[in-house]
Amino acid sequence: MRVVVKIGTSSITTSDGQVNAVAIEKLVSEVSEARKQSHDLIVVTSGAITAGLERLGIDRPKEPAILQAVSAVGQIDLMNVYSELFVKAEIIAGQVLLSPNDFRDRSQYLHAKTTFENLWELSVIPVVNENDAVADDAIRFGDNDRIAALVANLLDADLLVLLTDTPGLLTADPRIHPQASLVEEVAEVTRSIEEMAGGVGERGSGGMASKLSAAKIASWSGVRTVIAAASRENVLSDAISGVAGIGTLVAARDAHVSARKLWIGFALPAQGSILVDLGAKTALVSKGTSLLAAGVIQVVGAFSEGDAIDIAGPDGLVFAKGLSSVDSTTLDQFKGRRTEELPGTVSPTFVHRDDLIVLS
């Protein structure tokens, strides 16, 4: 079985912001045991910024550029901890730094896949993190949950395990509602399920909302996801074995979505949005067509040709996302026009179906 396991900052740091080597050692031990069972594993880890703050002895800065510099310092210390603990387990680990562009560019995408395959051939456990130090803040992921999900898609994984500091998705915030209970299984990540997730975690950049977003990506890739507590004994082996009740299981969809469309939907920030009429929405959702000029009723924001844009129905709710084939000025000028009314220099296809993903 191919397994991608991601552990969050809150699970490998202490309450005072120190890197928790004991927690990492637990993960390494469970990864080692899983590999003895002939599973292929990838570890996606957060914690570089926290490690950098610890090394530098400073408080967490607000400026993104400084945080990127801090992560460069922390990467070394964090990887040293992983390397030393994997050596104790008689395993060699290799670091892989990824950015959204690695999933956008076809050649980089295939190169990344080959790199992972070769690391496995060499009996190396890949340890993955976002390339925070040099990533453009406008296109960076911002959390490692989505990276883990996209890696699961990249490698046709069987299972994504998201380890966190809670038992899984709860019906409410336990700090406010002590009676909140664990949601053991999610058939589909709907809007009501997402509303249970709340906001961003205290020490990490993700939180449960990010976990559900990643689980949704994995589900659309045909990969099942388990969200569970990193501190739970044998959590990884139980997740692989399919033990019930160890956390929240998010089922895989039967229909798989291509990596390119997942990249458009979840890795690219929207630079603007458009509203379409009901006929266009129906055609996009039910028939898988391209979006034509005639169906557009409103343009919001300024964007360029090739930018990602949100697509909303007449009710204003976003249901799709795609790459615009024209800039916002051109789109606004010719919105609502039939194909025969457009000049020959303007394509009637404003968003091609190959560049569009229906999100709900």
Image (cartoon, helix red, strand yellow):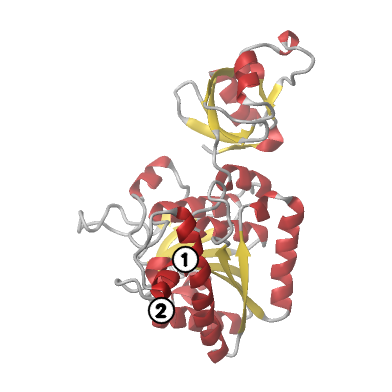
Q: Horizontal and vertical percent for residue 246? A: 40, 68
Q: Nearer the viewer, residue 272 or 163?
A: 272
Secondary structure under the numbered disc 1 in the rendered image: helix
Q: Is 322 placed above or below 150 here?
A: above
The x, y position of residue 299, in whole percent, is 54, 22
At 61% from the left and 13% from the top, the residue drawn is 336
* Residue at the image position 68 percent from the left and 81 percent from the top: 123
Which residue does the numbered mark 2 point to in the structure image? 23
Residue 106 can be seen in this image: yes
Q: Position of residue 335 (x, y in %)?
A: 61, 15
Q: Quadrant of the N terminus?
A: bottom right
Q: Residue at x 40, y 69 (%)?
A: 53
Q: Of discs 2 and 1, which sits in the foreground?
A: 1
The CA span between labels 2 and 1 is 22 Å
Earlier sequence position, callout 2 versus callout 1: 2
Query: On the image, which quarter does residue 230 sit in?
Result: bottom left
306 and 30: which is toward the camera: 306
Q: Residues within 10 Å of mark 2 (few under 14, many from 20)?
A: some
Please state which amino acid type lies under the numbered disc 2.
Ala
Label 2's element?
helix
Please indicate, yes or no, whether residue 1 appears anywhere in the rendered image. Answer: no
**Count of picture labels:** 2
The residue tagged 1 is 70
**The residue under label 1 is which amino acid type?**
Val
In the displayed structure, does residue 24 sit left or right of residue 305?
left
Q: Position of residue 290 (x, y in %)?
A: 68, 28
- Examine the rendered structure and indicate whether residue 263 appears above or below residue 283: below
Q: Residue furthest top?
A: 341
> Would residue 177 be found to the left or right of residue 125 on screen?
left
